[in-house]
Amino acid sequence: MTRRLIVSYVVLVALALLAFKVPVSVTVGAHLREDTEATVQRDATTMALLLADGDEAALGSLAETMRAYELETPASVDVLPSWSGDATADWSDAELVVTVPGSPNGAVRISYPAGALHERVWEVWRLRALLAAGILAVAAVLGTLAVRRLTRPLGDLRTMAGRLGDGDLAARCAVTGPPETQTLARALNSGAERLETLIAAQRVFVADASHQLRTPLTALRLSLDNIADGVADAAVREDVERATREVVRMSGLVNGLLVLARAEARTGGTEPVRLADEIEQRIALWHLAGDERDVRFRRTGAWSAEPVVLAGPGQVEQVLDNVLSNALAVSPDGATVTVDVQVGRDAVVLEVRDEGPGMTAEEKARAFDRFWRGSGRTGQAGSGLGLAIVRQLVTDAGGAVVLDDAPTGGLTVRISWRPAAARSGG
């Protein structure tokens, strides 16, 4: 927008200069033509008067005047021995010819080349063109300064809107510039403050509600387990087990909401985390559940590099639990879940690849939405918060997470963390 405004301003100034300079230059050219003709006629008349005297002194003065005139001007002077007409001034493409009678039988003729007049006219045009170029240059500089001063508040507003879009609710912009942008800045700041207040209240509510629900859900599950132990009727036992599964799912949902609320609060900073150690611990936990269905975990990549990443306290553990549990849930019996680590200069990349049914492009686009549950095996028992939690935790640490197709036809969860220097010691 800034460039377009500057170009428009310079074009407008250029059009104004053309509208003013061209007619003026044309008028000046016409005046030069008239002045040249009048001057030549006056000089020819002066010489004709000397010719009319006819005595020896006047003729000598005429000869000297003619020589001096030809030296000082581009014109040539001739004395016609006979002339019976009146004074004339004739223009042609090549010259101006002025003839003035000076005696009954003679006249003075001055031939002034038109090229000299054209050169004077072009000098006027060149001078005015240089002047116009200078004015355009000054206008461009002043226009650039003015436009940048006017658009700087808009740039601040755009930056603030971008920060708000990225989730930075503390973003504010300075109230500067014209009254219109000041009004807009105040409105945007006020809306951001209101939004920050509402979201903070929402996060507090979600955290409090999740925390308060954990205890009764735990008690309800224990009661259902006790009931199941004392029931002999198969139908009643099946109903109790179904209720227990729903309580377990609801507990997972509440825990997920609590994790999200804590992650969105962004409490604490990042710290170096030994990724390989965390993965070893989480695989050691989840392989027990995998052994029940003969699902194996295979490690590949740069494990010997001992990658160290930047993450918040406990975040890597929560990310791995969600990703590995999802991969295990969608994997068929006897499948393999591949855990690959690659270390680069700018990122440490973890890929978890399963051999499940995978996801369509539409499902990948929605997989990070809260409470979205797919149509596969995870959709039946999942809370719909796992991948949302993963993205929140990873992005809070400055990383990124994407979903891609696995070579085996399943799903690849690719997580990138910022690398950190490994700490010394065991």
Image: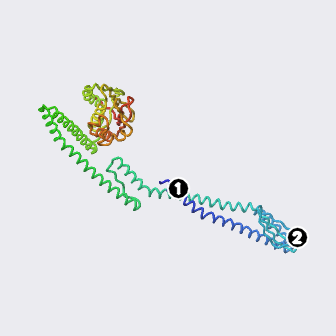
Q: Quadrant of residue 222?
A: top left
User: Left or right: where does residue 123 sit relative to residue 208?
Assistant: right
The residue nearer to you, when weighing 194 against 246, is 246
Q: Secondary structure at mark 1?
A: helix
Q: Which residue is mark 1?
A: 7
Residue 404 rendering spot, x and y as whole percentages: 38, 35
| Residue identifier under label 2 | 82
Q: Say what amino acid the circle numbered 2 marks.
A: Ser
Residue at 83% x, 66% y is 78
Say which quarter of the image contains residue 259. top left
Up-down relation of residue 245 to residue 290 (above or below): below
| Cα–Cα span, label 2 and label 1 | 66 Å
Q: Is residue 19 above or below residue 383?
A: below
Q: Quadrant of the C terminus?
A: top left
Residue 26 location, x and y as percent? 66, 65
SS under mark 2: loop
Give percent across and percent down for residue 10. 54, 58
User: How many other residues sit within 10 Å of disc 2, few (<14), some (14-19) or many (≥20)?
Assistant: some
